[in-house]
Image: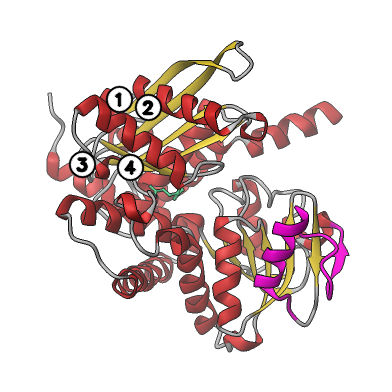
Amino acid sequence: MMVDATSSLEQELNPWLAAEARFDLAAEKLGLDDGMRKVLRSPAREITVSIPVMLDDGRLEVFTGYRVQHSIARGPAKGGIRYAPDVTLDEVRALASWMTWKCAVVNIPFGGGKGGVVCDPTVLSQAELERITRRYTAEIIEFIGPEIDVPAPDMNTNEQTMAWIMDTYSMHHRQTVTAVVTGKPINLGGSHGRTEATGRGCLITALQALQHFNIDPASARVVVQGFGNVGGMAAKLMQRLGMKIITVIEYDGAVHNPKGLDVLGLMKHRQETGSILDFPEAENVDREEALFTECEILLPAAKEGVITSQNAHKLRAKILCEGANGPTTAAADEILAAQNVFVIPDILANAGGVTVSYFEWVQDRQGFFWNEQLVNGRLEEIMVNSFRDVTGYAQKYRVDNRTAAYMLALDRVSFAIKLRGIYA
Ligand code: GLU
């Protein structure tokens, strides 16, 4: 019995199986033919490389790196690179396909890709991370480029990582090519507003959902899981608009204040103490239970597979705004639908990041840079339109928002493939 339960939960937590389940449902509703389904579900290219690196203590280690290009039907592959000890090819493959659908939902001219390096960044020095990044870039160098595949930051990678990739690529090409990656530092071809973009996109879509329910943002209570670039930024921006961030959950615990936490103060407290716990004017609470706090908006912004068939029924949120990629398993979808939770699916909610990545790529290629106001205005326009496109599909086809987002994306990508035709 025990063994069965574990293996079925393991299956449920496999992100590639989750991606396939959602894909199948949307393809079915759209009535896509078998051939097109085969094309859409097969990653165009999967690269696995060995990354030999000399560690600081003189030992030679070999890391494994992946880059999956799921689709290039609508433009160059686009998507982040993550560093983590548990990265798998299945995970990178799922994330790459989500990038294809995400770019299609916000209608930007990219396909989808994702990369990963199996390593534990917490035990590596900056110098070791730099050597890993440069060698990984060198190993995949003929497969990336402004017109081929444009990486970006993801879990445990940041603008410094992007600067190293840009430099390595540029050294090989004997010219500075800023548009090969996005999420770079501002003075190296980065864009204003990129760091905040994913969190800002979450805010914009959450505001649209509140409007849908006629809820005044000032009376909205928010629970945030993950206080990093996505969750932290979203919380900061939400609080600025008067929303109450009542609970913040991190890997080592959670803090709660029913009157609302001071987000900037909490960030400072974490910087000083290394943890969000023991924040004055807040109560430390159990991190598992904290996810079930009653709220208007629950924002999971950490990692995959946190809302599952085991706990979805316990959620007490009206709106689920998926800041992370794949925080909800496919098996949990039905439970959420039965509870009438309004889901803003990841491929819409967190698409602000890749949208501003697109702006960065455009600016780099033009050599002409925009101010932050212009970036934020254009981001808002795209996010609001995409929210309407997705909810419009949900109404038209009488499906939940996630299925609607997948249907919209599949429609756009399959249309591009049909127009281009199959090269033989
Ligand atoms: N890693 C981010 C995501 O999952 C950003 C990707 C990008 O900007 O290309 O959407």
Q: Nearer the viewer, residue 109 or 342?
A: 109
**Residue at label 4?**
181
What's the distance in space between the residues labelled 3 and 4, CA to CA?
25 Å
Q: How many marks?
A: 4
Mark 4 lies on a secondary structure that is: loop
How many residues crowd mark 2 within 10 Å: few (<14), some (14–19), many (20+)?
many
Q: Residue 413 placed where, x, y %?
A: 27, 47
Q: Quadrant of the C terminus?
A: top left
User: Relative to 122, does residue 118 appear above or below in the rendering?
Assistant: above
Residue that appears at 45% across and 26% down: 66
Give the magenta part as a residue range: 260-286
Q: In the image, which disc is placed on residue 141?
A: 1
Task: Name the residue type under label 1.
Answer: Ile
Report whether 17 appears left or right of 71.
right
Q: Nearer the viewer, residue 184 or 382?
A: 184
Q: Badge 2 is on which residue?
A: 137
Side of 195 relative to 294 (left or right) = left
Residue located beneath label 3 in the image? 417
Viewer-side label of 3, 4: 4
Tell me the distance, in whole angstroms, between the alpha carbons under discs 3 and 2: 29 Å
The amino acid marked with disc number 4 is Val
Ligand 1 within 8 Å of the CB at mark 3: no
Which residue is rendered at x = 64% and y = 82% of the image? Answer: 220
